Amino acid sequence: MTDDVLVVGAGPTGLTLAIELARRGVGVRIVDAAPAPHRESRGKGLQPRTLEVLEDVGGTERALATGITRLPFRKYFDGAHVNDTDPFADALPTPDAPYERGVLIGQWQVEEILRERLAEFGVGVQLGTEVTGFEQDTDGVTAVLADGERLRAGHLVGCDGGRSRVRKAMGVRFDGTTEETQSMVVGDVEAEGIGRDVWHQWFTSDGGGVALCPMPGTNSFQFQATPELDANGEPLPPSLESFQRIFDRYARVPGVTLANPTWLSVWRVNVRMVDRMRVGRVLLAGDAAHAHPIAGGLGMNTGIQDAYNLGWKLALTATGQAGPGLLDTYEEERLPVAAWTLGVTTELYARVLEAVKEPGTGVEAAAPPPMGTGYPWSSLAGPADEDTLGSVGDPAVLRPGDRAPDAPCLDASGHPVRLFQVYADPRFTLLGFGAEVADAVGKLAVEHEGLLQAFTVDVDGRTSGAVADLRDHEGHARRAYGVTDPALVLVRPDNHVALLTRDPAEVTAYLARIATFTTKERYSEYEHGSV
């Protein structure tokens, strides 16, 4: 039996990708070398854009119910309380951006939510299955397992983390640096005698520090600290006893006892990324493709967004609805994002190191800029010349390649519906603003039924004498998309604007291009990979 796609690694990236494929009817198998799911906090935050992604995937409601959206930072310096701050205290949701802040949640909890969602499509994770190499040809990929078994698939995606065996087998470069002298001990521990209503951060004038972040839904805190050093200046291995000594030294809070560790680890500053995310039928996503400092909490988020970008493209390719060249746009769009992430997290980490030295400066000052603003450079971004956009949308508001905004509307029955709910369909979405384009919207929906869903949109609820599919009753959709005149807005399956136009022929041409994408790859160059 040959699966359409084999996903290697069942972390947040691999699980998101498997869901995206399964909900589009693609035959997917997901394997992981671990014998059982972990229960470690690891990456512990979902950013607003990732919440938008997970809403489409089907996990945001459960993530919000599990996690915490409001947790103040409490900073101490040399044992004295300095301040309590909430960097997002004044943030409010808007019609076009419903999630004004991220959510604190353990990585294991995110994975549990995603596994449950994947199971709803009849797909489970195959645990205890380690891929050690692969062979590929023009028709597919054969994965070689540690026990000698061989699995056949049309494509293989390595989501197997920073030590990715798939990446090593591909032979791509993983350029960057590892700073062995800059490290941190991390873990999950219980802490008797300390409140769980704030994220505690203790720092000292000698540059050391320790932090305890209460993890929702558990009795544990995530512990982060400067490591203890041995007589030679080398970091000591993490242990509960070491954690207690570190806490006593930097926090200076008597009577607090750490207990019941469920995760003990060392984190080192890694700044690396691949030079390629695709070799023939084998691709990389998440930490397997890029590693960066933990500042800003972008790791898990970047991986989920990698998977969201890749999922629909791989599904269309695997089912023959798109040419294999569509997969080239995955690297085209996500490799620059990986480079941006490496740069911004490195800068943020440096700012954190400086912030801890100042009594009045909070680590929250190093909050990252928003992710997911779009891919304006992409070849998938439709025509963007001023003449084209001038009569359709305001280019200062929105351009092809940008993230598609949300907006509250009414459906044909007058019930409230958000554009994000409309976009949850795995196909492209066409919005036709104004009666002048209503007939074209209906024809395009019929002509491209398997690839496109289409809706007429009008403020007065009437188009060509019929009730509109969507009513922009408060004008939020028109404002968000910069629309004043009749317009056609084509939105990609991953909720980015593909095209802004008034000409139905441009929509047809765009979708035809998706179906006929060609690739420059020659699979014969990359037949084998093993480690």
Image: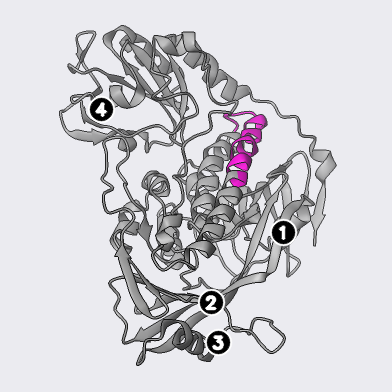
Given this view, does label 2 or label 3 mark the residue nearer the observer?
A: 2
Magenta stretch: give its range: 320-339
Q: Which residue is mark 1?
A: 177
Q: CA distance from mark 4 to mark 3?
A: 54 Å
Q: Which marked residue is nearer to the observer: mark 1 or mark 4?
A: 1
State the predominant SS element of the stretch in magenta.
helix
Report the side of 43 relative to 31 (left or right). left
Q: Secondary structure at mark 1?
A: strand
The front one of 295 and 9 is: 295
Amino acid type at mark 2: Asp
Q: CA distance from mark 2 to mark 3?
A: 23 Å
Mark nearer the N terminus (4 vs 3): 3
Kindly identify which residue carries mark 3: 239
471 displayed left or right of 118: left
Amino acid identity at mark 4: His
- Residue 72, percent across and down? 31, 64
Q: Position of residue 154 (x, y in %)?
A: 67, 44
Q: Check disc 1 and give the amino acid type.
A: Thr
Q: Nearer the viewer, residue 359 or 166?
A: 359
Residue depth check, mark 3 versus mark 1: number of the one nearer the observer: 1
Q: Is residue 134 visible?
A: no
CB of mark 4 within 8 Å of CB of mark 2?
no
Residue that carries the numbered disc 4 in the rendered image: 476
Whether residue 123 is situated above or below residue 470 in the rendered picture: below
The residue shown at (69%, 89%) is: 231
Q: Which mark is residue 490?
A: none
